[in-house]
Structures are given as C-alpha cells and as structure tokens.
Image: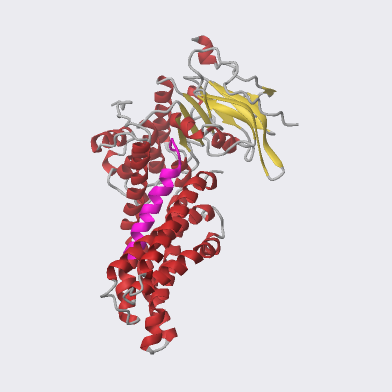
Amino acid sequence: MIPPPSGDSEPRGSKSPAPPPLQLDGVAHRFGRRWVLRGLGLRVEGGEVVTLAGPNGAGKTTLLRIAATLLRPMRGTGWIRGVDLVARPGEARKGVGMIGHSAALYEDLTAAENLRFSLLMKDLDAGREQILGILDEVGLSRHADTRVRRFSAGMRRRVAVGRILAAPPDLLLMDEPYASLDTEGVGVVNSMIRRVVASGGGVLLSTHDLHSGAHLTDRVLTLDLGLLHEGAPPSRPVTPTSVGTPGPRESQA
Amino acid sequence: MTFPNAHTTHSHGAGAAVRRALAVTWKDLLAEGRSRSNVLAVILFAGTALLLFAFALGPDVNDLRRAGAGVIWLTLFLSGILVFNRSYQVELEGGALEALLSYPGSRRPIFVGKLLANLVIVLLVATVVLPLAAVLFHVPLGNGILGVIAILLAGCFGFVTLGTFYAAMSSRSRARDVLLPLLLFPMLVPLLLAAVQGTGAFLAGDGMGYGGAWLRLILAFDLVFLTATLWAFEYIIGD
C-alpha cells in the first residue's frame, strides 16, 4: 500500500536554520503497473555524501530523476533547499546539478562551447578565461577548442564535471559517475564532490562501484523493492532506514 | 585554481529568459553550421521536390503558374519536417535533452530558442525555394514581391512554431519520423490555405487587395499558435 503524499507545503523535521539540500517525503512512482518507488523518504544534509546502491532496475535512476525535477512523482513530494520540487520545479532546479548516465554534451560543439552554453543557460557570465580555467581544472585545457565528437568517454565525463565546477550546486545528483573513468578521472570526480561538499552542498549518487568514492561517502543506502534500506548490499543485513539519519561524518562533527 | 562562485549571475525574469532563448538558438545554429551536410541535404531535398512537382504538372505554362504558390508552400512544409526532426535529434544523440531540461527556470526559453533556430533554417531554405520556383513554375516575382515576402515570413513563423512544438512532442517516440507529419500536417491546413491564397494573390498583383487580408489572417494564426504552444510546451516536454 502506498502512503498518500503528505500535502505539506514545507518539509517536516527540519530543525537546522537552512533547509537541507534534499528532502523527499512519501515519494512513489510506477511504470505501467509496477511500482518502482513505494513511498520512500530521504534526506540529504548539507555537506553530506549519500551513495545509492541497489540492483539494476531497482529505481535508482528514477529516484535521481525525481530529485532533479526531470520526473514528477506520482505520489509524495520533496524539497530542494526548502523549495517544493513538485509545485515549483523551475525554482527548485536552481540549486541542482546533475551528471547522468551520459555526459550530455553536443557532439559538434567544442568543449569550451559546451561549457559556455551551460553557463549561459544558468544565466552566468561565460567569459573565455573562466571557461579555460574550468577546463584546466579537469585537465582538458589543451582540448578546449576540440569538438566533443573526438573525445573519449572519459574526456566527455570530464567536460560534464567541468559543467558542475563552473557553478557548484546545492544538490549534486550523479548517476554512475565513475563509469568509463580511469584513475585520474575518478580523482577529478572525487575532487568535484569535495568541492560541492566544502561549499555546503549535498551529494546523492548512484553507483555499482562502491569503492571509487567510498572514502567520501557518509551513508550508503540500498534501494530495493521500491524502498530505501540502510547499508550496502549484500554484505550487511538490511533494515529500513529512518528519514534524516545523519551520516557518520556529520555525527562526529 | 578555484572557480568561484565568482561568476556573476545576471538579473532574472524576462531578460534572463531572453538570454537563455538566444543561447539555445546560438547553440543550435552553431551545431547545424558545423554539420553543413544537414542544411545542404534539406535544400537539395527542396530543390528535388520542386523539380518533381514541375515534371508532374507538365509543360503547360498556365498550369505551372496556377500551381506555383501551392507548390512553394508544400515544398517548404515537406522540407521543414526534416529540419524539425533534426532539431531534437541533436538533443537525443548525446543524451543532452535531460541536461537541457535540468537548467533552472521555465522551459519556455528552450522552445523559443529552438523555434528561432528552426525559423532561420527554414527561411534559408525559402530563399532557395522562391527563386527556383519562380523559374520552374514561371511565377512572376516582380509585382508583389514584398507581399510574397511578408506572407512567407508570417507563414513560416506559424509553420515553424507548430513544427517545433510537435517535434518536441514526438521526439522521444521511436516512430517520430512518421509521427511528426501525422500530428503536424492536419494542424497546418488552415495556415496552408491562407498562405497559398495570400501568396497567389500577391503574385497576381493583388488587384483586389485580398493579399493583405490573407496576411492578417496568417498573423492571427501565428498569434494563436504561439500562445498555445508556449503554454503547452512545459507540459509536453517534461515527463
């Protein structure tokens, strides 16, 4: 049985002065007759990295797409920094950065042009010097004027990372961020995660590769049968997680 | 090296929406300009279609002249389908559509930006179609050329508005190549009638002053199409 949405206009349980980067409440979604998400709740605190694990088809991507306002949940709602992502998706997206399965770049544009377009769409200044600086940070300054069509999968992923670094978001969502990356590329992704965390943002990532970012992760949640469980599969016994459980790093702080 | 949050955020509101729309137009035209083969293919298609229409109608100059206005518009409509499909194919190729949709704010500037880019390309095709049709169909452009250009601009705007909208609607369907004309062409019938009649009137010298009336009707269609598609785009491009 799917619980009904709360209908609240403000997130519940928020005691900190600043609303958390992400809070989901009673989120449910189905494709056809199959409920992929069954009324789950999740809270990602500022400065926290939450890793989503789970088998293929468990609904990890669906959950990330809902958090990114790319998919409207059939039940329940959520808030990004206190902004209702169902009622005011355009405003909620202001604080979100997402790296999906693919790098989401335009093949016939150069790396610099792809970054410029991204900055323009966020209504930010897109000067050549700034763009070259970002590309330098992800190790692609020498390829600034090369069309993305000629890039390897790893290089494309770096441009996508550059897009995030250009304007660190309040909430960073990543779907399999370590796919197709060499060791250096993994380091670039991890430095991006550190940057977002250092600026007070939250990170929610789904991955099958629990090792590459293990040292950055505060909590691992497993999505299975439409619900979230604390801990990584399958080594630990799983128990339903409580919404808003602080991560180890936060507890220590 | 750090990058700030040192980027300046511009003011929001209408100005931001215009800048975002122009960014989409810039990106689409740049990508099309780089892969010139696509625009060239559309122009070649339009030229071939005109030739086939001319052969099909036979050698009689009066028949050709009478059909001229209709053939011009049918050729533009058929060529436009290729432009509209391509417009969203670019987004789907690298999975860029989701990134495009995840930018902050309303999604209407995306629609407006794509509309403008498509309009530029369709008008580019029209600049080839019109003189070529004048030669093949013995259409006299001298007298009412300004009126014809006004009808072309207004008609293409309405056509591209609907085309860009339905292309977005069908973009994620596997059958989009078939779906787009099936959705679009029935909606274009009133515009087609007005555009053909208006173009015909101006080409004939517009002695009765009907051309201006058809033009006003097309402009009214444009307004209705733009209002409706702007309102509906946010819903059809989302989930």
- Quadrant in the rendering for residue A193: top left
Above or below residue A210? Residue A108 is below
In the image, what residue occupies the spot 42% across and 32% down? A189
Single out the residue that lies furthest toward the top.
A253
The magenta stretch is B103-125
Figure label count? 0
Single out the residue that lies furthest toward the front.
B208
Task: Determine the main secondary structure of the stretch shown in magenta.
Answer: helix
In the image, what residue occupies the spot 42% across and 28% down? A169
> Where is residue A25 shown, x and y percent of the image?
62, 25
- Quadrant in the rendering for residue B222: bottom left
Judge whether residue A72 can be spotted in this image: yes
Above or below residue A29? Residue A152 is below
> Where is residue B144 shown, x and y percent of the image?
29, 72
Left or right: where B220 falls relative to A29: left
B124 magenta-colored: yes
Judge whether residue A208 can be spotted in this image: no
A107 magenta-colored: no
Quarter of the image where the N terminus of chain A is located: top right
Above or below residue B122? Residue A1 is above
> Where is residue A36 shown, x and y percent of the image?
66, 37
Left or right: where A240 falls relative to B108: right
In the image, what residue occupies the spot 34% across and 39% down? A120
